Amino acid sequence: MEEPVTIRVAIADDHSLVRQGLRRYLDMADGIEVVGEASNGKELLELIGNENPDIALIDIRMPEMDGLEAARVIRDQHPKVGVIMLTAYDDRQFVVEAVRSGARGYVLKARDAEHLIQTVRLVAGGNMVIDPQLVVALAEEPSTAKERDRKAETLTAHDIEVLQLLAFGHTNRDIAERLYISPDTVKTHLEHIFEKLGASDRTAAVAEALRRRLIE
């Protein structure tokens, strides 16, 4: 029998009380281990280099190197690390920038511990999870008339349905069950959607769809 896989998490927040609270909740969850804490982006990058975590839970606003800059470095240098942005801000400027920085999870600090734990597990499993309130903020990002005109040219109603499910963190298997198709068909369909949107992965596809206001 295989040993259950432990999700290793690094936390970055400039408030020690926040870090301590996050560590307590995450360490209490089955299958999750906090491997270290950082008070800014520079410390986080050093921590990631030493511990190689599965997940980096990052506050957007930190001194020296903020969460957005740290996320971009992680995306480029440690692409296997799933970045979850933890923030009190639901302003679309922060949300859109977080999307573009490569984060795969977006959690508002007002959420409860169970939501955070579920997000950690989903992102560690390769999914993208966007807080519903943040989806609304992203959907308000302005799009040009040219981009709006491209909606009908590039994406079908079925494409948009798949993207909507993707944005709320559903796995390929979940999407397959909801749409009564096979997981392999979902995978092929996503590849076509990525090509249409000029996206390289699930995160980029959802970000582009939200930016164009194709999904809400």
Image (cartoon, helix red, strand yellow):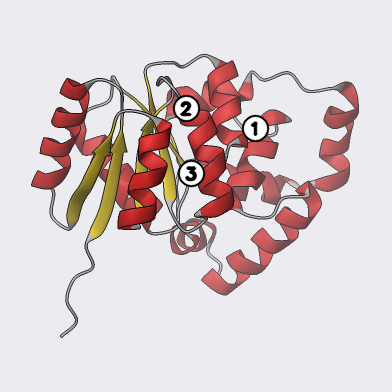
Residue 114 horizontal/vertical position (percent): 20, 37
Q: Name the residue under label 3.
A: 104
Q: Is residue 202 above or below residue 112?
A: below
- 206 lies left or right of 131: right
Please identify the quarter of the rendering in which residue 18 is found: top left
Q: Residue at x 68, y 38 (%)?
A: 209
Identify whether 3 is placed above or below 19: below
Residue type of the residue flagged with mark 1: Leu
Residue nearer the viewer, 123 or 13: 13
- Distance from Cα at disc 1 to Cα at disc 2: 27 Å
Amino acid at dot 2: Met
Residue wearing tag 1: 210
Residue 18, above or below 179: above
Camera-near label (3 vs 1) is 3
Q: Residue at x 50, y 38 (%)?
A: 71
Amino acid type, callout 3: Arg
The answer to whether 199 appears left or right of 187 in the picture is right
Q: Earlier in the sequence, mark 1 or mark 2?
A: 2
Query: x, y percentage for residue 75?
Result: 55, 48
For marks 3 and 1, give the CA distance: 14 Å
* In this view, the mark in front (1 or 2): 2
* Residue 70 in view here: yes
Cα distance, mark 2 to mark 3? 19 Å
Q: What element carries label 1?
A: helix
